[in-house]
Every structure is written in C-alpha cells, then in structure tokens.
Image (cartoon, coloured by chain):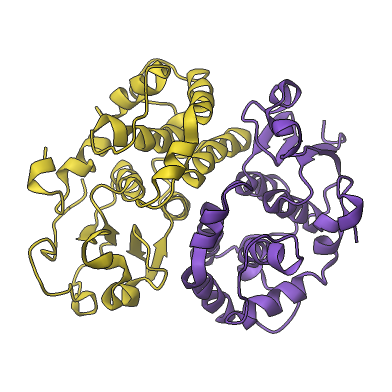
Chain colours: A yellow, B purple
Amino acid sequence: MPSVHALFSLKYSGVPATYPLYISFSSQPILYSYFRSSCSWRVRIALALKGISYDLVPVNLLKDGGQQFSAEFKAVNPMQQVPALKIDGITLSQSLAIIHYLEDTRPNPRLLPQDLKKRAQVRMIADHIVSGIQPLQNLSILKQMGEKKMEWAQNCIASGFQGTAHCCDLLLIAALAVQLVVSQKLFCFCRFKVDMGPYPTITRINKALLELEAFKVSHPSRQPDTPAELRA
Amino acid sequence: LQFLKCLLFIYFRSSCSWRVRIALALKGISYDLVPVNLLKDGGQQFSAEFKAVNPMQQVPALKIDGITLSQSLAIIHYLEDTRPNPRLLPQDLKKRAQVRMIADHIVSGIQPLQNLSILKQMGEKKMEWAQNCIASGFQGTAHCCDLLLIAALAVQLVVSQKLFCFCRFKVDMGPYPTITRINKALLELEAFKVSHPSRQPDTPAELRA
C-alpha cells in the first residue's frame, strides 16, 4: 500500500511551501496532488493498483491564487500542473501520460489490455473523457460533456461489463476515467447537476470500483489535504 | 484484411483530423478519405449514417483492421503499435512520457470548433512552456528527431490554424519565434504538405491551395 503522509501542512501555514528545500532520503516517487482533483485521483488510483509507494505533497489549486502557480512549485514542475509525479529522476504531469509511464516501466499488474485493438479502444474512451474535462474553474465544459457522450461511454462499457467488481483489463482504465467523472457528482463534491438516472450501468460500475482497496485508499475524502468537513 | 485500405473520416480544417492525416502520411499508410462536414446540416457527424460508422459520432474516425477508432492520439498510438516503422514516439521511456505529456497537454486544451474561449484560455503561459520545452531540444533542422516529432506535430497544428489564416483567434506569435520556426520547418515536409487542410477533397474552392 502506498505510504501517504503529508510533508507540509499547507492548509494552515501562511508560509509558502518550500518545495526546493524538500530533501528526500528515500527513493520513493513524489506525487504532487490536490485532494479533490479527479486528475490527481486518477494517478493515485493507478499508483495504488500497481502497489507503488510514494510520498504525497498537497498542492491547493484554489488557495493563494492557485499554489500550482507559485514560484516554488514552478521549480518542481515548470508546466505548473497538478498532478505531477517526480519519478526516476524526471517530473511528469498530465494524468494519462503519467499512467502510461507507470504502465511502461512497472508493467505488473497491467492496466491496459495486451490486445492492441482493445488497448486502442480503451485509450479512445480515456482520451474522450479526459479531453472533455477542463480545469476546475471551467464549469461550462463539463456541462458540455452532456448526456450524449456519457451515454456512449455507458453503452461501450455495458457491452463488456461482466457483472463483477473486478473489471477485466479491457475496461479498467476506461472505467477508471469514467468513474472519476461520475464520482465527482456521486460523492457530493459536485457543483454540476448531472442526472445519473439514464446511466444505471455507470452508477453500478462506480459503486463496484469504490469497493476496491485502490479506489478507497486514494479517495478524495481520505487525503492529507482533505478538509475536516469533507473527510471520511 | 491487411490489403484493404483504411478509411479515414475527416473534416478538412479540423486540427484533430490533420493530426491523423500527418501520422498516416509519415508512416506511408494508404487510405481512402471520406469528408464529414462538422458545421453543415447541424453537423454531419451527428447523422444516422455516420453514427452507424462511428457510434461515438466523432471526427476524425479511422476504420482500420476491422475496428473503428476515434480520438486522434488513440488513433496515432494504434498506428504506432501496429505499424511501428518509422517510429513517431521515442524508444526511451522517459522521453516517450515527456512527449506524451506535451501532446496530452495540447490536446486536452483544444476544444470543439465551436468553443473559442477554450483555445483562448490556453493562453501565452502554456504556449511559452511548449516553446521552451521544444526549444531545449530543437536541433535546427526540418527533420525533427523523434523525441520532438509528435509534440511538434501537436503544437504545430494548434499554431498552424492561426498561421494559415483559417484562424478566428488572435494569437500573437511574437513571443514564440521557436514555435514559428518549427511550424515553418514542418510545413516543408511532404507528410505535412500532402495532408494540409488546403489540399483536401472537401476544402472549399476559396481556401484551396
């Protein structure tokens, strides 16, 4: 299981986090994450599924004008994006690029199908979901995802869903991506009114996935930077 | 089935479509092209006929090896996995991750044709980073090393919409001489020329090269 301990208490400190002064004596990867960011959660899930231990540094995307824009964080990740993963001497952002790197370098257990056509279909769904999710501030984009695209995702997943919580790898990364879009609403972190009535399959997948240890331990309600009132 | 040409559904001015056309050209893959107009008839991608081809109702869509794929980067990855020569992605896994990061960064910031505000929101800050990242590796030649190719490809398509005057956005390229230079160099490559929006079957006469 990943060791998830906060290294800086950013919530209450008026002092900017001094990222460059963080000296790690362990060779564990470092994940810069925001508790409620679906992109951050996506990476936490992948790390948990692969059993990769990491240190977690919270970055609040709303406070101080967005801590990802601080000079300190820019020194860590010039792309000024969260999640960011410091691993093997490089720093990566973009959740799917990070997940692909983990898949390439730590292949067991696999998240992507071995079959190249199925792998392409999973990538297609994941890209479809991720390209439709905009920064936290951009409500209109998530609304624009609309029922039509969710309906397709549901149909696509439904055609392969075996009725078990342990999705076959064909669906895993796609379900992962879909689940995170959906979970924002189901977990009541949401600010959007997505009616899940037409999508019982997605609801069922979400429920099943939330039973998995990797999804529980990485949940936004259980992060070092989760505010007390939202903590599980 | 390998002898059958693939079928690419595209819109001439769509940067996502152009991206796939470039990849197919770079890999020397023959294809038949079916234009789908994203603006006419309420968007031809939403027609019942096209839905039968691609239930995701998205363009570009590639019918290949018995399946239909959409999402330009998913398509490009499939081509890379199944037709590996010549390679578009670096062999080195760290460099490959960095290229994917840049490509995803560009693609996640590009919205449907109707959504002007999103492309504007990409803003100078992100373009500046892309420029710096590419500049750090650019060798001064039109034939980019593979490390940069797919990233340059993605960046170029964002930029070229403005440079080719298909644009509707006022992006000041003044601060980004490196991106401008890359774009100019890439447009000299045959794969980029033959796939250019000005040379497609559905390019309107007034925009044709």
Q: Is residue B103 above or below residue A50?
A: below
Q: Is residue A189 above or below residue A157?
A: below
Q: Position of residue A94 (x, y in %)?
A: 43, 56
Q: Is residue A227 above or below residue A168?
A: below
- In the image, is A107 to the left or to the right of A165? right
- In the image, is B153 to the left or to the right of B106? right
Q: Position of residue B119 (x, y in %)?
A: 55, 58
Identify the residue at image location x=69%, y=45%: B82
Q: Quadrant of the C terminus of chain A?
A: top left
Of residues B18 and B160, the one drawn nearer to the viewer in this rendering: B160
Q: Position of residue B105 (x, y in %)?
A: 50, 59
Residue B163 image-quadrant placement? bottom right
Q: Quadrant of the N terminus of chain A?
A: top left
- In the image, is B100 to the left or to the right of A201? right
Identify the residue at image location x=19%, y=79%: A21
Identify the residue at image location x=22%, y=43%: A220
Q: Position of residue A68 (x, y in %)?
A: 31, 66
